Image (cartoon, grey):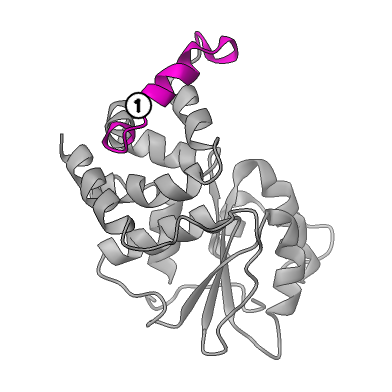
Amino acid sequence: MPSGCSSVEVYRGAAARRGLDARKNARKCDTWDVDDTRADETVSVEARTVVLVEGTSDRIALETLSRRLGRNLEGEGVSVVPMGGVQAIGRQLATLGPPQGQRVFGLYDVREENLVRRSLEQVGVTDVGIALTRGEMEELGFYACVMDLEDELIRALGSQAVEEVIESEGQLPSFHTLQKQLPWRGQTVEAQLHRFLGSGAYRKIRYARLLVEALELKRVPRPLNQLLARL
């Protein structure tokens, strides 16, 4: 991690080809067959740094990006922990404090910002009654996705590139079916893609890796970029 970084001591056509390569590689493992709603609270005893994320798809995206950047988070002593929902963040922050003393960072959806803010305040990172700004939360190592990580990736890739990744998976007809459904007619393509990626049993997990693999590294979403720079 770069020197001088602070953290909570109590505790980021070519697109289609990259997506196709990711599909071939990802089918060699069973990572997709994971329930994204299940909390995985296991932190390696050797981990010096913990990154709290909402679900398994967020962990896959972060770890996939780190590999593309030539990094090995586990080898660096970083443990990425899906909480099974941000509601668990208060308990996690309390659990990871002294005497364990790991540095803790986080990635969250902007709609959950108030909960994350209150949880940080409750573990004593600021005086009682003084609300943390988003900038101050970033200084502590907690970064907001607007509106969530899927939305960040859709905007970074562009709708056409996302559709190319979906087509490489043979699921473009399913996406077109969603577009014809009454609630989604007339919505923006970006909104339709967001709904598509968030529906289905394991779709978020399945596409987390593929979208990050298709991403141009100069267009990495800001929260992912900022978070990885701190680790």
Give the dominant element type of the magenta stretch: helix, strand or loop: helix
Which span is picked out in magenta? 166-186
Please indicate whether residue 130 sits to the left or right of residue 167 in the image: right
Q: Is residue 182 magenta?
A: yes
Is residue 210 shown above or below 169? below
> Hey, what amino acid is under mark 1?
Leu
Viewer-proximal residue among 114 and 78: 78
Find disc 1 in the rendering and name its residue.
Answer: 172
Is 72 left or right of 200, judged from the image as shown?
Answer: left
Label 1, secondary structure: give it.
Answer: helix
Q: Residue at x 26, y 36 (%)?
A: 168
- Residue depicted at x 74% and y 52%: 115
Is 205 on the left or on the right of 168, as rendered? Answer: right
Q: Residue placed farthest to the right in the image?
A: 129
Q: Is residue 190 left or right of residue 52?
A: left
Determine whether 109 is above or below 53 in the image: above
